[in-house]
Image: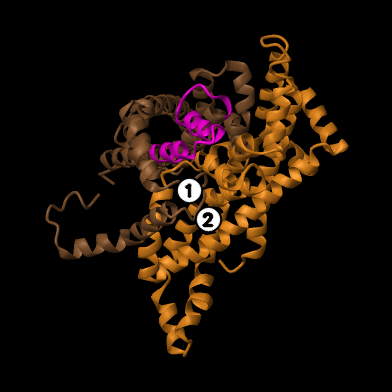
Chain colours: A brown, B orange
Amino acid sequence: MDVSNKLSFDRTDAVNAGKSVYSLIIVLLIWEIVTQLGMIHYYFLPPLSDILVRFFEMTVDGTLIYHGYLTVRRALVGLVIACTLGIVIGVLTARNRIASWFFDPIIEVGYPVPVIALVPVFLFWFGTGDLSKIVLVAIGCFWPVAINVRNATRDVDENLIWSARMMGTSDRQLLRRVIVPASAPGIISGIQIALPISLIITFVFEMVAGGGGLGHIEIQGVRTFDSVQVYATLIAIMILGFALDRGLRQVRFRLLNWT
Amino acid sequence: MSYANLRLADVEETVPESIQRPVRFLLEWIPLFIVIGFWEFASGVFVPSVVLPPPSEVASVTWELLVSGDVLPHLQISLFRVGVGLALSISIGVLLGVGMARSDPVEDFFEVFLALIYPIPKAALVPLAILWLGVGTETAVLIVFLACLLPIVLNSYNSARDVDQNLIWSAQMMGMPSWKIPLKVVIPATIPSILTGIRQAIPIAFIALVSAELIASNEGVGFEILRYSEVGAYTHMFAVLVIISAAAFFAVRGYEWLEQKVVRWT
């Protein structure tokens, strides 16, 4: 984040950058040399150059872009549903005693369930299309969001609420003006925890059930003994994960720059 | 929490002291019974009971599976995988985290790899693990290991960075050789936050385990879930799900209990 503020690039920066990536370059070079010499079976570890060429081909002909779009759509739609429900129920649970009585034990019991194990049953209920994936992502991401929002909202400083009340803030304004802004860091942390979960559920679902998406392409590579495809898809997944993570960090930075 | 306790406490005080604990327990868990009751009612009325088996049936099948011991070998295999994966990631993660925090060359070497692994959802590495290790225990252990590695490395790295410099200076002043300092001073000082890292890693380990077993396994709990659903035995599938959820739940609770018993100096 602080790099973008600095426009000049002097010698110490270059040295630091060299220090932090030299190990990667060494490993990649060894990878390329060892595989070109045929010291490792092609199936286990194809040469890096082959993988990059395939990655380029699959990007240009649109395969990776189309399937990446499918994956991102499923993960993000599910995540948005989970966040909406999780924030509403989390805030309610923290601020309302009846909601707290009702939802607390449910959250305690629901949180540790490995929702990912429901993949086969959702396949049966909703088929192989988008719907089953989105619903399962929404359920899987709901728990971490709800529990983080609940904890953050519960820990809002009571003095803030009393001060606002004393100055005549109404109940409805209190929620919007005081409670939600004060618990925003915790809410966004919950979303940051849920983001990788949404991707994991989407990938596993695509691998088990098919129906397109990067996970499907990747497992297809294993089934057709085409390891280059597995590696090329993995590069796309890495870029995707990185972009989503960075995007969320940017959102956090923009929204919370007052903290 | 304060609101909820207030309310429950009021009710509790109206009953004799001897039954206050069970009453409180019941009051706290009523919502769960409501949900289960609604599920029991809904299955067979709104949705066919084949699709969503009622909880009473799931409970009886769970009991049956546990008593007959059909699921126990699979549970044993799965717990073994989680255990080995976690143990590997703890031993390597703590070494990496502490090493990176205390030595710049180590940090320069490994940081870029961790930064590359970090954005990948670990389940996406299952196909790669199948390429290398085939279908079975090794794949599941590798995925659990990778998934748990980062929380443990991050926690031990951050706290090893923040170790009180006075502790290190004191140790040096008292003549401790420099190679002993990480072992005798830094790691003991970072243990509380390493334990937090492990606490965060346990649920992740179970998610990683089930995803690896769903995609690539011939045994284990994840495989059992997939197999029961393929033959259409959804009641059994839910029963296995209950068992693995309970295992994950008690793993976390048991760990927290152990942490409180063992780590008394914090």
Question: Most extreme residue toward the bottom, as rendered?
Answer: B175
Left or right: residue B232 compared with residue A79: right
> Label 2 to label 1, Cα distance in Å?
32 Å
Look at the image and tell me whether residue B200 can be seen. Answer: no
User: Which residue position holds label 2?
Assistant: B197
Q: Amino acid at mark 2?
A: Gly
Report which quarter residue B240 is drawn in: top right
Mark 2 belongs to which subunit?
B
Reply above or below: A110 against B159.
above
Left or right: residue B40 compared with residue B4: right
> Mainly helix, strand or loop, the magenta region?
helix
Q: Are marks 2 and 1 in contact (CB under 8 Å)?
A: no
Residue B135 coordinates in the image, percent (x, y): 64, 41
Q: Amino acid at mark 1?
A: Leu
Residue B71 coordinates in the image, percent (x, y): 79, 38
Look at the image and tell me whether residue B213 can be seen. Answer: yes
Residue B217 coordinates in the image, percent (x, y): 66, 39
Q: Which residues are magenta?
A: A208-236
Residue B109 coordinates in the image, percent (x, y): 38, 63
Q: Nearer the viewer, mark 2 or mark 1?
A: 1
Q: Is residue B148 magenta?
A: no
Question: Most extreme residue toward the front, as rendered?
Answer: A37
Residue under the point 72% across and 15% down: B41
Q: Quadrant of the C terminus of chain B?
A: bottom right
User: Which residue position holds label 1?
Assistant: A45
Residue under the point 52% across and 49% down: A41
Q: Secondary structure at mark 2?
A: helix
